[in-house]
Every structure is written in structure tokens, then in C-alpha cells.
Image (tube, grey):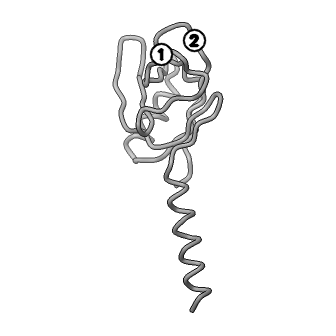
Amino acid sequence: MKIRNIIILVLALTVANSVRATIGPGHVNGKITNITSVTTGILVRIDSSIVPENCTSGQAWMQIKQENTAMITMIMTAWTLGRNVTIYTSPTTSSYCNVIQVDPAES
């Protein structure tokens, strides 16, 4: 009986840990919580407005430029399906962090 309880505890902790967003120097992983469009492309927010460490503009939005149609399609699909994503960014001098890759995470 104790082994069963330990297994349940380990599984519960694993699931709880996998739901949180993770942040790195040039990436963020988590659930898309909001998207919007602007004249220059799509803006994306992850979890509670977290951004990668290299995004220092103070903005919670990360921009996918309009010409990056494959990434826009990927983010729209992930948003529609409620999938987690990993977004890789490069710092920029504009007001939004520049998205350079969108990777849908396995649920």
C-alpha cells in the first residue's frame, strides 16, 4: 500500500511541475494565454506574462513579424488547440521581443 501512495505522490508532483512555465536566457515554455494582432505581426503572451531573460524592454508581449507566416500559423494552431509552446527569442531595440522560433510542446 505504501508503494502505491509513493507512486501517486511522484506522479502528482511530476504533473504539477510540468504545468509551470519555464524561462531561459533566450526562450520561454508554457501555455499561450493571449494573442493579438498589430500591423507588423502577431503578439503573444505566455502564462502570467512571462518573457525570456533576454527580453529587457519591459513588455510582456513577444512579436512574431508578419513575414514569418509559418510561425504565425504554428502559434495560431497551438493557441486553438490549447497546446503549450516553447518560444525562442532574440533581443531587439523595438518595444517587443523578437520571436525567432516557435516549437509546440508535447502535452
User: For this rendering, which residue is in front, 89 or 10?
Assistant: 10
Residue 66 vs 85, above or below: the answer is above
Residue occupying the far front of the picture:
2
Q: Which residue is mark 2?
A: 92
Residue 96 x/y as whole percent: 47, 16
Q: Secondary structure at mark 1?
A: loop
> Crowding at label 1, few (<14), some or many (≥20) Cα neighbours within 10 Å?
many
> Where is residue 100 shown, x and y percent of the image?
60, 23
Q: Residue at x 56, y 70 (%)?
A: 11
Total residue callouts: 2
Residue at the spot x=34%, y=25% of the render?
36
Q: Are marks 2 and 1 in contact (CB under 8 Å)?
A: yes
Identity, as a three-letter code, of the amino acid under mark 1: Tyr
The residue closer to the viewer here, 43 or 77, is 43
Which quarter of the figure is the N terminus placed in? bottom right
Taking the spot 56% from the left edge, 38% from the top edge, the residue there is: 86
Q: Residues within 10 Å of mark 2 (few under 14, many from 20)?
A: some
Q: Kindly identify the residue that appears in the image at 49 percent across and 21 percent down.
A: 64
**Does residue 35 appear to the left or right of 67 in the view shown?**
left
**Relative to the observer, which residue lies in front, 75 or 48?**
48
Residue lying at the far bottom in this picture: please name it.
1
How far is mark 2 from mark 1, CA to CA? Answer: 7 Å
Residue farthest to the top, as pictured: 93
Residue 69 or residue 99, whichever sits in front: 99
Q: Secondary structure at mark 2?
A: loop
Residue 1 to residue 23: above or below: below
Query: Mark number for residue 71?
Result: none
Q: Which mark is residue 96?
A: 1
